[in-house]
Image: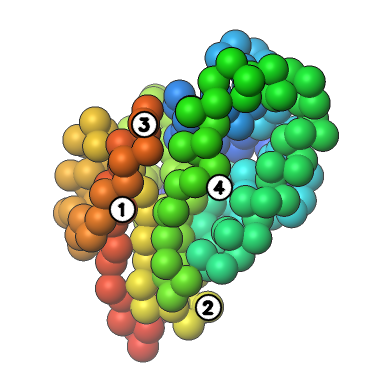
Amino acid sequence: MDDILITKGDPLSNVGSKLNCMALEYMAYPLAGSKEPTLIEKVFKKLWEIDSNRFSYEYAFEAKLNDKTVGMITCFPVTVMNKLNWLTTKKLFKLRNLGLIRYILLHPKETLSMLSLNEGKEDEYHIGSIATLPESRGYGIGSKLIYFAEEQAKLNHYNKCSLTVKKENKKAIKLYEKLGFKIVDSIEKPPYSLHRMVKIIDIDTIF
């Protein structure tokens, strides 16, 4: 849709952090150190508002329809993402402190799996998270956000765009394949089972 506008993430957005939580689903538990939805939203709202972490507005773009945020994508070079992973962990410990430590002690395998995910290669531009509000689905917003991320990859001189997707998310996998992404690898880190998907893009062409 031509009336969808994609803008830089706004630290004051009331929807950005919610969309990050939607994208992560159960993968947010070890990050927030809780399975309680209200607490998870509170943690990710704080991460959204501050810089130097992978869930920050700093690396996000919002899709707006009629001036209302209806979708969000985070994207960055894998080299940047790898640095942000450590910074994100530090900020989470500062935010959650004993709550996060307690969760790690109760769920050590889950936490170790999350920390050891190898999501991308250093020559790739990575889509860290993407989500759209349920009421806005069917308008092609997800596709437009993906194309926008590819444009950012080109502007940063990367010819590969990558993402990970839960294997059970058949609908998302079908969309990514339709947009030209191919499954290149699998990540098996119980309880997480993910496909790694990559698309080769022509850096000489800007959308």
Of label 3 and label 2, which has the lower sequence position?
2
- What secondary structure is marked by label 4? strand
x and y percentages locating residue 189 in the rendered image:
37, 38
**What residue sits right under mark 4 in the picture?**
62
Number of marks in the image? 4
Q: Amino acid at mark 4?
A: Glu
The image quadrant of residue 67 is: top right
Residue that appears at 62% across and 44% down: 55
Residue that appears at 53% across and 51% down: 74
**What residue sits right under mark 1 in the picture?**
196
46 to 72, vertically: above or below: above
Viewer-proximal residue, 117 or 44?
Answer: 117
Of label 3 and label 4, which has the lower sequence position?
4
Q: Amino acid at mark 1?
A: Arg
**What residue sits right under mark 3 in the picture?**
190
Circle number at residue 156: 2
